[in-house]
Image (spheres, helix red, strand yellow):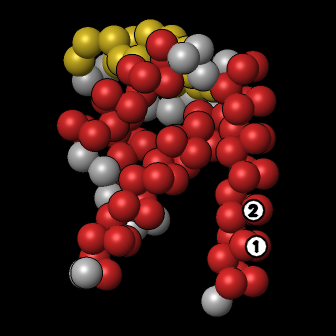
Amino acid sequence: MKAENTKAQMRKGVLEMCILGMAAKQEVYPSDIINKLKESELIVVEGTLYPLLSRLKKANLVDYNWKESKAGPPRKYYRTTDEGNSFLLKLKENWLQLVNAVDQST
């Protein structure tokens, strides 16, 4: 078993929470999400992000606004919905419980 594979699976597991967390703070543009995740070493490519944003939208956890861009066509900026904010709180609670359980087990 390779540690890199496990690390990649762990990253995938927390992406949703990270994206919701960013969108809860302010409206975010997908390329800004990707850049922030790269800075945090939770590397994501557009091919991963857009389907996830679509699933979050269908689940009514995020919504988007179109904003005009000086550099081209209008852009979608994402923000959490009220339901998304509640879901994010539950994810954070679950995350803290998981971290605590792992800390106690190792």
Q: Depth check: 84 or 5 in front?
A: 5
Q: Quadrant of residue 79?
A: top right
Residue at 64% x, 89% y is 106
Residue 94, compared with residue 101, is above or below; it is above
Q: Secondary structure at mark 2?
A: helix
Residue at 68% x, 64% y is 98
Residue 31, compared with residue 37, is above or below; it is above
| Amino acid marked by disc 1 | Asn
Residue 99 screen position, x and y as percent:
69, 70
Residue 4 appears left or right of 66 = left
Q: Secondary structure at mark 1?
A: helix
Report which residue position mark 2 lands on.
96
Residue 105, compared with residue 52, is above or below; it is below
Measured in 3D between alpha carbons, the distance from the residue under mark 1 to the one under mark 2, in whole angstroms, is 6 Å
Residue 47 screen position, x and y as percent:
21, 37
Q: Say the numbered circle drawn on residue 100.
A: 1
